[in-house]
Amino acid sequence: MNIPNCPVGVFDSGIGGLTVVKELQKFLPNENIVYFGDTARLPYGSKSKRLVTKYSLENTIFLNSKNVKIVVIACNTASAASADFLKQFIKIPVIGVIEAGALLAAKYSKNKKVGVIGTKSTVKSRAYSKYINKLDPTIKVYEQSTPLLVHIVEENWINKNITKSILKEYIDPLIKLGIDTLILGCTHYPLLANSIKECTKSITLVDSSTAIATIVQNTLEGKKILSNRKTKGYTHIYLSDLTPEISIWMNDFLGENFIGKIKKYNSQLL
Ligand code: DGL
């Protein structure tokens, strides 16, 4: 096994984690990427910590079977529930998306009032508050669960007027609390960034996919396992369910320069 040229493993409950894949492709164009999206069992955000940890473990075992050199949890819900457990379970580095977003928010907030939107499970875990307050205990963190948004993205209702009304309903209470920074605490939400910006105006949005790409790069560099490939890497995408709608959406999202393949993965684990 040639570790530097082994792929980077990424998983999410669905297609939202592809926002992280896009950033990784930009930052680390020579890396191969294996992505697993658990579309058959989405959403994770309304499930118990125990079940999300079980799914995350199964996803990690699948990625490990593809000889990945690092596992990126491109799902806030799975990071909150299982990052600590997975770090102990597997010998390769495991990076969770929450630590990345917390780091950026603590850096950006001037008035030390940070809002977070995320799934019910992520908000219930208070993982963002814990990470941010570890960095700076004086920052006030206000967390708001926004359970409808994952379905809106998966249905591709991104630019509908009703989506803008729902966003306003969720985000206005945070704006009233005076936040100057808002964490998009779910990897599906960057796909709604334009509509979110219409509600938040001058508030700084934190998209943890950018932050996580830098952390992955630093980790690979630190462990001397960056790819030494000179050509562009491929991305293999495995989904536990693949509908025609998702295929169309993914082809649009990944664009024509996409090098790789999209497959349905039928595992006995699932
Ligand atoms: N994309 C996942 C996250 O970042 C959540 C989607 C779900 O509820 O499954 O939290």
Image: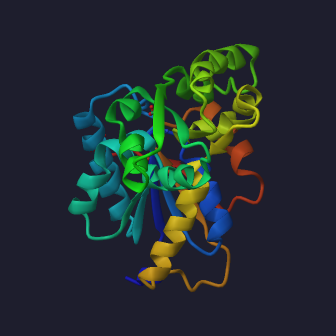
In which quadrant of the rendered image does the C terminus lie?
top left
Residue 96 in sight: yes
Q: Quadrant of residue 13?
A: top left
86 to the left or right of 212: left
Quarter placement of the N terminus: bottom left
Residue 165, located in which quarter of the rendered image?
A: top right
- Determine the residue positioned at 21% across, 60% down: 89
Counting labels gives 0
Q: Nearer the viewer, residue 236 or 115?
A: 115
The residue positioned 47% from the left and 76% from the top of the image is 220
Above or below, comparing residue 250 to residue 83 in the picture: above
Q: Residue at x 38, y 70 (%)?
A: 67
Q: Quick check: 16 above or below 230?
A: above
Q: How is the image coloured?
A: rainbow
x and y percent of residue 269 in the render? 27, 44
Report the side of 176 relative to 86 (left or right).
right
- Residue at the image point whose x is 74% and y is 43% from the top: 252
Residue 73 visible from this viewpoint: no
Comparing 216 with 71, the one in front is 216
* Place of residue 191 in the rendered image (x, y in percent of width and height, measured from the top left): 66, 38
